[in-house]
Image: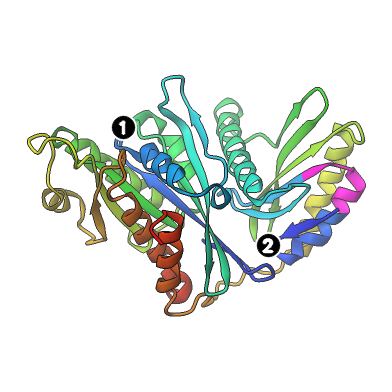
Amino acid sequence: MTITAVETWVEAPLRKFVEEARTVLGLLLHPSGQVVAQFGFARAVDVMSACALAAAIHASSGELGKQLEGKAFRGLHHPGRDRQLYLAEAATSRGAFIFLTVFDQESSFGLVRMYFDTFCKDLAAAAPPMSHQPEVVLEDRFEHELNRNLAALFGRG
Amino acid sequence: MSLVNYATREITCKIVYYGPGRSGKTTNLHYIYGQVPEDRKGKMVSLATQTDRTLFFDFLPLDLGTISGFTTKFQLYTVPGQVYYQTTRKLVLQGADGVVFVADSQARQLQENIESLQDLHSNLAEQGIEARSVPLVLQYNKQDLPRDLVLTPAELNDALNFRGVPEFGADALHGPGVFETLRSISELVLKRLSAPVR
């Protein structure tokens, strides 16, 4: 099982969750839709679409919860014929993350929820303090490469 | 905030196309989708009504290739333009690294453009974001319509571009201005990663 993580500190809690809960797909993302870690997805672009949709589902069901009950729903469970999904929020000192996981007959909703609670605790414990120091990532003169890549993208290269 | 993965050397940025209803936000994404090779784009996701009006958002992931040694990916979103989708616009705007404001150049749409721009500023402020700090590009779409129906870019600048941000006349249906707009917002967003504001 391969886990890809943008931030390395999420990898160990996620690996533990996957092994214990026996789910087939998983996505940890920012509420803005940016992926933080994933397992089980074949193509990077599918991950991005799944993130955008998961963030949308989370945001809209949260708003619906606020309107119905005065507070956001804690989680969302969709049972399918062969596969089920569970979507919920995990709070850490680095802000809230959304977790989406898909499971089949190898697991169960009860099991997933139980291990999700542990996952939230592990994630919160693993989260390093937030650094507010911005870093220089790109070189000063990146525009040439950007323009070349965009031109190629639009068939103008 | 752009997401930087130092381990895999990847940058992911979120760009939101904002503007009043029927200004051409989705058309921008459709044009981009149609131009970009298969291996450089993901599936375009549209959460729309039966009449193809954007209900929640459109989403298009793009692979811009390698810049300064980083694989650079952009996630393009649109918001629903109609006034009553306010909550949805706020949700889609969360975490945006840059905004393209697509204005409808038709003279009779000027008030809608102004209100939508005010709506953008107020939604950013609600999220604790100073609007002036967010990379912004204006696109004056539908410049292909008959001259007596549309305002010129200079007239639209007077009404909308009080920040003096980059602005482009466009015909998103056929392409002029779409590429230039995307290039400009990409540059503004990535500039923050080459010289972050301290």
Residue at 37% of width from left, 38% of height from top? B27
Task: Identify the amino acid type marked 1.
Answer: Arg
Say which mark, if any, is on residue B22.
1
- Give the quadrant of the C terminus of chain B: bottom left
- Image coordinates for residue B134, horizontal then vertical, percent: 38, 60
Q: Quadrant of residue B11?
A: bottom right
* Residue placed furthest toward the left: B148
Secondary element type, mark 2: loop
B152 or A22, which lies in front?
Answer: B152
Q: Are marks 2 and 1 on the same chain?
A: no
Residue at 51% of width from left, 77% of height from top? A136
A119 or B30, which lies in front?
Answer: B30
Whether tag 2 and tag 1 are in contact, CB under 8 A, the answer is no
Image-based side of B184 in relation to A13, left or right: left
- Image coordinates for residue B96, horizontal then vertical, percent: 47, 53
Image-based side of B176 in relation to A41, left or right: left
User: Does the magenta run of residues contain A22?
Assistant: yes
Q: Is residue A12 placed above or below A74 in the rendered structure? A: below
Q: Which region of the structure is painted magenta?
A: A16-25
